[in-house]
Amino acid sequence: MAENKERIACIKPDCKGDLNPLFEKHLKGYCMPCFDAIEKAARDLYIKNNIKDLNPFQNISDKVEILLTVFNYQQFYDPLINLIEYPKSKFELVAEMTEHELRKLSQKVSVQLKSPNQKERLHAVEIANLMAGLTNFDLDQLLLELLDVPESGNAIFRRSGSMVIEELLLRLQEGNTEALLHLAFVDNESVTEKLISLLDNEESKIDNYHEALKHAALNAGWEITPTRQKRHLYYHQSQILDLMEPPSTAHTRLDLYTDAHLACPLCKGPLLLLANLAPQIVEKLLGSEIAPVRIPFYYCNQCSLISEEIFCEFEKADRASWHACNNIKYPPLLEPASLHFEDLPYKNLSFEVGATPQDPFLFYEFWLDNLRPHKSKFGGAPDWLQNCDYPTCPACQRLMKFILQIDAAGLGIFELDSHYAFFCDICRSISATVRQCT
Ligand SMILES: [Zn+2]
Ligand SMILES: [Zn+2]
Ligand SMILES: [Zn+2]
């Protein structure tokens, strides 16, 4: 109390704050909060009066130059400069390029790939990935160069032509594990046969080739069946999901995170339906790849944090039930959740399904995150935040197939969350959700 008496009152009328007399001169008689507010107002006014527009695209009409400029300015920040953004995204710019423009772009990328600056190399790899996902441009020349770029990633090698495949197979024979990771993405029968045939002879110089191939295959979204066939763990049809605000009924619409009107059997919190896919939607989006069936996906906000995987059983057409295997996976002493459905950060979100089918691996690599505001998708390959984690079906013990990903982080719901939905296309009566955070 004695110390308090020595403090002096803030000079701002009506302010009940006080300050230490030692700082009176520095704070100009104001208390700390008032002083900060005055300083901030002065700074804001200065910025408002002095901010200048900068349009780096003013004198550029060439699409390739525009794209490279977008990349150069993407991290630019100066409070006194109002950077005019290009009205089109990188995504749109690349998708609209002519063959001639793509050739010019690939030459630029090729030069940038050799840059000693890692950021520049990453930009080049990012552009190459956009070209791979959005165009049919022949990428072989670029892929040959990417083979020796450490930041290249693996998924881009799905676009390998005969020249690159030949080089990769050579490297594989020399025991190069990177080549195996790249080759697993090549969706070509003879390549797959070659990879699988190496399991039976001792030709491979890769240590524990069986494990290495299993890992490379999972990474590329497939597994080797007991009869030594390739089984895809994703549907080739791929659509981007965009949040609909306000929800409309005019488009193909998916309602997510709806109330299951059930208590979670484990934590007693609200059980959600991450999605309840109607057979028409499944058919419309995945076409002939799957026979139409209604697929419900259970999700619990609390339990999914602990176990990540939640299984749902739906033997009877419209009735979903909690799979008993969930009860074994969880620790028994989970705090009962006091949450209600209304309290959840996400509830009843509606998504519009993109009109154009996309490459199943578009935006696959984690560092391509900044290419789109969010990357929720239906079909295609999952964009894992952590290691790939296809759940095992509790009924048939086979890996389940990916069907839906909601990028909750991109939606601003959770900071770094992605929710994935899977379906067992063998039993056709089991679904699962998986939650990953970074
Ligand atoms: Zn004050
Ligand atoms: Zn729960
Ligand atoms: Zn199954």
Image: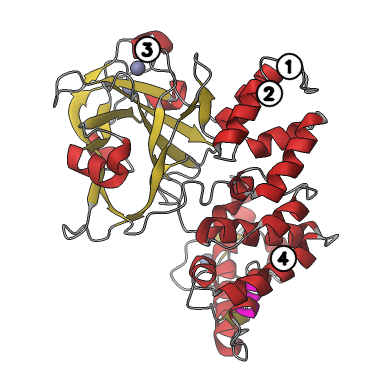
Would residue 28 be found to the left or right of residue 273 on screen?
Answer: right
Q: Pick the residue in front: 259 or 364.
A: 364
Which three-letter amino acid code belongs to the residue tagged 3?
Cys
212 to 384, vertically: above or below: above
Query: What's the CA distance linking mark 3 and mark 4?
Result: 47 Å
Q: Indicate which disc residue 212 carries.
A: 2
Q: What residue appears at the point 45 percent right and 31 percent down from the top-left corner?
A: 233
Which three-letter amino acid code belongs to the residue tagged 1?
Asn
Query: What's the CA distance linking mark 2 and mark 1?
Result: 6 Å
371 to 147, vertically: above or below: below
Question: Could you tell which of marks 2 and 3 lies nearer the N-terminus?
Answer: 2
Question: Could you tell which of marks 1 and 4 lies nearer the N-terminus?
Answer: 4
The quarter holding residue 125 reads: bottom right
Magenta stretch: includes residue 66? yes
Magenta stretch: includes residue 405? no
Can you give x and y, in whole percent of width and height, for residue 104 in the image? 67, 74
**Callout 3 secondary element:** loop
Residue at image mark 1: 208
Q: Main secondary structure of the magenta part?
A: helix
Which three-letter amino acid code belongs to the residue tagged 4?
Val
Q: Residues within 10 Å of mark 1 (few under 14, many from 20)?
A: few
Report the magenta residues as a range. 65-69
Q: Residues within 10 Å of mark 2 (few under 14, many from 20)?
A: some
Q: Pick the residue in front: 312 or 246.
A: 312
State whether label 3 is within 8 Å of ligand 3.
yes
Query: What's the CA distance linking mark 3 and mark 1?
Result: 27 Å
Residue at image mark 3: 396
Query: What's the CA distance linking mark 2 and mark 3?
Result: 24 Å
